[in-house]
Image: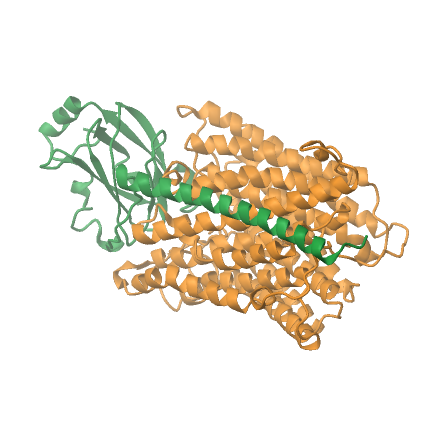
């Protein structure tokens, strides 16, 4: 079928125009998604761990904030709670973390050997735990309850056995726990 | 015609043979960690298997498919015998040596570090060197693709480069640059430690370097599938390619945007600041654009085929499509899986939503749906399309081929949908077994059992695939019609410079990678306190 040249150009233009429209529509959708991300980041401060802080994994146990006596949860002067956790093949220390509900909680987590990961089931808490770096993130728990906290990054042949627990208690119970000890873990 | 049939067949057969072995490992893994049995409690065997499955499926299988496909398509598109056949064979043998060098220590349990390596865990040097040899073998292919296109351009000054070759070379250059990240990690961090020359590693830096490779490698896997969408499917079903220009723009955009986005794998990592995480999130959103363009162009192309066959109405034309044609079926099933997988991908790249599913079974589900689903089903379609031209023999039962494609689709859905759900429940990936007695463990047990069933369906499908190809070698000889590519509705007479070569896009790819990766890498290299002791797996060297 032979088409006159003018008609050929016409259909090519139509095809190009339709495709351009589709292209712009898709760019629009992508822009909306990015805009939502920016808005949520700014309005509710939903941010991933964002500080690059280093620490020597070979001296964690000797001194500093990750020495054994400092692990677990503690009230800060401003009423928030800080939790220090170490991951190592194949357990977390402390093995059970106790935190108050409806309180700002800051996690500071690092690894003593290889790369680990932690997530608290039923929440959005999810971080990589890497030797040499401290993962810091802020969160708060809505209600008392028990959560599992598995290691989610392959860390050796015992990886599947590396689980901890997070126990969320109400504020008063937590205050009682910390009234006679500086740090709180479920063992107390 | 294909001049070097044996070269192409050697690549494809080796690819599908290792694929057949690795899929058995995958199904075995699903079975032994399910609650269906209680006799094997050896986690070490499980992680050996995961390492082998991932290494083969991630590095060896797709690389060999891309290489064989590239050699065939460069000869078919440029209508000239491959330049550098001896080099091509050398690359092939390097891959064999590399695969064996990597597989043996993995089998012995000296390298259970998974295919993502995980420093500061360090395995036997032979594994890492084997992986490097596989990559070097594939770089020979990259160079040959460039050389062949260059020779053709010199002989055909000003002529439009055939779309099939434009896309093949785009895929080759993407791979060459993508592999650099993991190569740097292997050569400068892992191999020296594995050989005992050094004993510490910056694990955070290693992860950033690996992320350089880790995402763009998926687009390297994806290239043959997309080339098939554009240049095989419309022709095979009797349609026209809706737009040649849009095809070139899509491949060029893949080249530019596939690279500078890998840090979205590190959203939960402590060694990268929020700024670069955000930047990579935005660029990840951008890389969905070429796929969205492709979906439009290919749907329009098959609509043309339907209308030429008498398809009518706004939606009625879908019915008139040649559904009994394996290429049509493969395309449709691939698009459905791409749709689900792509939606999951948009969730993964979302800066905040990612924290719900990072490193859970959701991620396993997502990349199996995209790679093993949408992409590998097109590898099958490519093999079915090329095989008669490689063997000079008729393709057997189309019904068996359709059954195979359907089983692959059903198996993939049954495998991955429960995985997505398990991920939302917080089930971590890469676990030899789970504690099904933990709270909620029974729900997770059910999802794992469903995935075992899905995996079994996939094994059957893969066996049928290999059978069909094998049978073809014994089928009656035919003289296949000359191989053709899809004709665009409007044949490009003269293309703008930017769409007739890859110079501009390769430049943009490198520049964007350096902007998006340069600072984090430079910053991490300066952090000497982040050098941590290596942890040897399977004994010190």
Relative to B140, is B285 on the left or the right? left
Relative to B372, is B17 on the left or the right? right
Q: Return the x and y of residue B246 as percentages of the image width and height.
A: 60, 54
Indicate the quadrant containing the C terminus of chain B: top left, top right, bottom left or bottom right. bottom left
Q: Measuring 55% from the left and 45% from the top, which residue is drawn there?
A: A22
Q: Return the x and y of residue B179 as percentages of the image width and height.
A: 51, 62
Q: Is B157 rendered above or below residue A84? A: below
Relative to B282, is B377 on the left or the right? right
The green-coloured chain is labelled A
Whether residue B238 is visible to the viewer of this picture, yes or no, is: yes
Whether residue A45 is visible to the viewer of this picture, yes or no, is: no
Relative to B41, is B329 on the left or the right? right
Indicate the quadrant containing the N terminus of chain B: top left, top right, bottom left or bottom right. bottom right
Q: Measuring 42% from the left and 62% from the top, which residue is drawn there?
A: B512
Please tell me the colour of chain B: orange
Q: Nearer the viewer, residue B355 or B118?
A: B355
Image quadrant in which you'd find residue B318: top right
Q: Measuring 79% from the left and 49% from the top, which residue is drawn there?
A: B470
Give the colour scheme shown.
by chain
């Amino acid at each position: 079928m032979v088409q006159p040249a003018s008609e050929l150009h016409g259909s090519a233009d139509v095809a190009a125009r339709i495709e351009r429209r589709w292209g712009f529509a898709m760019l629009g959708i992508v822009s909306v998604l990015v805009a939502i991300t920016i808005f949520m980041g700014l309005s509710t401060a939903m941010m991933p761990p964002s500080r690059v802080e280093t620490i020597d994994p070979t001296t964690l146990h000797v001194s500093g904030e990750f020495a054994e006596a400092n692990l677990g949860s503690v009230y800060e002067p401003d009423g928030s709670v800080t939790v220090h956790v170490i991951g190592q093949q194949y357990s977390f220390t402390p093995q059970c973390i106790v935190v108050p509900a409806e309180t700002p909680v800051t996690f500071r987590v690092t690894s003593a050997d290889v790369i680990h990961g932690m997530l608290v089931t039923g929440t959005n808490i999810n971080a990589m735990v890497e030797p040499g770096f401290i993962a810091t993130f802020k969160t708060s728990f809505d209600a008392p309850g028990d959560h599992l906290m598995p290691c989610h990054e392959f860390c050796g042949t015992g990886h599947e056995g590396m689980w901890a627990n997070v126990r969320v208690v109400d504020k008063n119970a937590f205050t009682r726990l910390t009234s006679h000890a500086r740090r709180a873990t479920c063992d107390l | 015609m294909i001049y070097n049939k044996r070269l192409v067949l050697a690549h494809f057969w080796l690819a599908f043979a290792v694929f057949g072995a690795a899929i058995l490992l995958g199904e075995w893994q699903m079975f032994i960690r399910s609650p269906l049995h209680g006799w094997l409690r050896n986690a070490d065997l499980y992680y050996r298997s995961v390492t082998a499955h991932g290494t083969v499926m991630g590095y060896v299988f797709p690389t060999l498919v891309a290489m064989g496909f590239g050699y065939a398509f460069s000869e078919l598109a440029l209508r000239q015998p491959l330049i550098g056949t001896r080099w091509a064979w050398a690359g092939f043998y390097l891959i064999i040596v590399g695969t064996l060098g990597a597989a043996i220590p993995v089998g012995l349990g000296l390298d259970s570090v998974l295919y993502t390596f995980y420093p500061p865990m360090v395995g036997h040097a032979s594994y890492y060197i084997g992986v490097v040899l596989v990559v070097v073998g594939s770089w020979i292919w990259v160079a040959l693709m460039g050389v062949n296109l260059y020779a053709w351009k010199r002989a055909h000054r000003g002529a439009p480069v055939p779309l099939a070759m434009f896309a093949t070379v785009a895929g080759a250059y993407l791979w060459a640059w993508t592999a650099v990240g993991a190569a740097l990690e292997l050569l400068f961090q892992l191999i020296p430690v594995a050989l005992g020359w050094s004993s510490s590693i910056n694990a955070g830096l290693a992860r950033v370097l690996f992320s350089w490779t880790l995402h763009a490698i998926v687009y390297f896997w994806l290239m043959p599938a997309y080339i098939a969408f554009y240049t095989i499917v419309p022709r095979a079903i009797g349609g026209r390619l809706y737009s040649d220009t849009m095809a070139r723009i899509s491949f060029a955009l893949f080249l530019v945007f596939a690279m500078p986005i890998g840090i979205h794998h590190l959203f939960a990592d402590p060694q990268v600041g929020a700024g670069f995480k955000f930047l990579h999130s935005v660029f990840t959103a951008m890389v969905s654009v070429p796929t969205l363009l492709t979906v439009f162009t290919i749907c329009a192309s098959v609509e043309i085929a339907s209308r030429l066959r008498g398809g009518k109405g706004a939606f009625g034309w879908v019915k008139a499509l040649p559904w009994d044609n394996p290429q049509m079926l493969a395309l449709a099933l691939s698009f459905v899986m791409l749709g689900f997988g792509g939606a999951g991908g948009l969730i993964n790249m979302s800066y905040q939503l990612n924290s719900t599913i990072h490193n859970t079974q959701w991620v396993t589900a997502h990349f199996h749906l995209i790679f093993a689903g949408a992409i590998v089903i097109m590898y099958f379609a490519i093999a079915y399309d090329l095989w008669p031209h490689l063997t000079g023999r008729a393709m057997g039962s189309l019904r068996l081929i359709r059954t195979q494609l359907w089983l692959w689709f059903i198996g993939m859905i049954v495998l991955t949908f429960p995985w997505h759900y398990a991920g939302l429940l917080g089930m971590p990936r890469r676990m030899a077994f789970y504690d099904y007695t933990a709270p909620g463990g029974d729900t997770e047990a059910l999802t794992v059992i469903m995935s075992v069933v899905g995996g079994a369906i996939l094994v059957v499908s893969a066996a049928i695939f290999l059978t069909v190809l094998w049978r073809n070698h014994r089928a009656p000889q035919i003289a296949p019609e000359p191989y053709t590519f899809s004709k665009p509705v409007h044949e490009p007479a003269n293309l703008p410079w930017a769409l007739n070569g890859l110079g501009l896009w390769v430049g943009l790819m490198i520049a964007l990678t350096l902007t998006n990766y340069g600072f984090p890498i430079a910053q991490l290299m300066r952090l000497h306190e982040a050098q941590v002791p290596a942890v040897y797996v399977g004994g010190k060297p």
